[in-house]
Image (cartoon, helix red, strand yellow):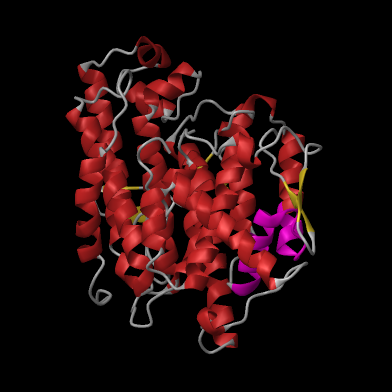
Amino acid sequence: MGCVPNIEVSSCYGFLGSVREVKFLDSSKFIFQDLGSIRVKQDKKLRWRFGSLSTYMLKYSCVGQPGLEIGRSFPLLSNVLANPAGEVAVSSEQKVYDVVLKQASLVKRKLRSAEELDVDEKPDIVLPGNLGLLSEAYDRCGEICAEYAKTFYLGTLLMTPERQRAIWAIYVWCRRTDDLVDGPNASHMTPTALDRWESRLEDLFQGRPFDMLDAALSATVAKFPVDIQPFKDMIEGMRMDLWKTRYKNFDELYLYCYYVAGTVGLMSVPVMGISPDSQATTECVYNAALALGIANQLTNILRDVGEDANRGRIYLPQDELAQAGLSDEDIFAGKVTDKWKSFMKSQIKRARKFFDEAEKTVKDLNEASRWPVMASLLLYRRILDEIEANNYNNLSKRAYVGKAKKLLYLPVAYVRSLGPPPRK
């Protein structure tokens, strides 16, 4: 599936790369064996239940513009697909776009009801316990982010305190969710356990957090116009990983990429904020966040083809493999042929187009939120360059961006994030 060895850069409007990587949270710190193994943390005024559940497009055209495509030369699937019986079915892109519209509408309603969303002046939501305990919960989220997503964490320090703490809380929830199926105890994960995790999510959205990390997210969703649907959709992606190991076409793969990565963009935009000088519609900004998530996950997939194959998984469109004269057996054999190189070129081209679309709208974000997003985008896109530098050998060699290169790109990302939003 993927979505922190040495990359440390988050994706999808900030941190999905950190979430979807193979370095997991230290189980000795706060991941336990099952729902019954809850470690209790004693506080002077309150006992916090401190556990986790680790065993258990795109130029989508903006509203009012025709077509769902990325540029003229790279059309995505149409809005509807015909099945073998001749019936019309909604494509994955359209399903996801409907979610995007809902999220954008939610933000606009919140803004209209409060003229201007100035989260930095609103008081913190006090959950069970006291403000000190909530502050401790946010601090713990920040520590986790600093440990497992160092580069992104540095970028969040440019944000206002309220925004950075909210992003940390979202990051930690996504990380914990991903560890359910990619973590040390993933082999014990069941659909029932994921159902329990989703029920726990619903509780924290209702102001009933299970532990201190949940409390941080509960306070965040109470303060920002964050909707539960992207969180639920991410859990759906985890369910998919329990049983699905092949994707017959890009439509199926796109939906998976949305579930495990695009969702993070939709979660993050309300916290990142949109620049008051932006001329882009809210829908366009959300589409860009979605595009970055898709781009990052496609990059994860292309980087990890060999590793995923060792686990019996192939996250590549089966129909496109067949058209290139390739099969699963060719991937398992691990041979980099001319056919494979040609196929990889087309896959990399697709991922880059998603990155290009995402970059167009980074400056439409709140000024203090742009740098970590731009750094994520530039560094993750660099992985595609490394795959090319490895002569398209992603079957036995893992492409990565070294520390020196990452450090060089950080000031570049900062400079490119400066300036007013583009005129539309």
Residue depicted at x 30% and y 42%: 350
Relative height, residue 65 to residue 407 (above, below): below
Q: Quadrant of the C terminus?
A: bottom left
Q: Which residues are magenta?
A: 201-223
Q: In front: 48, or 396?
A: 48
Residue 382 on image: x %, y %: 25, 43
When asked about the image quadrant of residue 414, the answer is bottom left
Q: Which residue is found at the position 59% from the left and 66% from the top?
A: 226
Q: Residue 25, image x and y in percent?
A: 55, 39
In depth, the one of 98 and 411 nearer the eye is: 411
Identify the residue at horizontal 64%, vertical 28% (top origin). 185
Q: Is 401 inside the magenta-drawn segment?
A: no
Q: Quadrant of residue 182?
A: top right
How far across and how far down the image is residue 8, in percent? 38, 44
Which residue lies most toward the front here? 44
User: Which residue is more in the foreground, 180 or 153?
Assistant: 153
Front residue of 235/291: it is 235
Residue 263 visible in image = no
Q: Residue at x 61, y 44 (%)?
A: 177
Q: Could you say where residue 396 lies in the image, as x and y percent from the top left? A: 32, 18
Give above or below for 271 relative to 263.
below
Of helix, strand and loop, which mostly describes the magenta segment?
helix
Q: Is residue 134 visible?
A: yes
Q: Is-magenta flag for residue 212?
A: yes
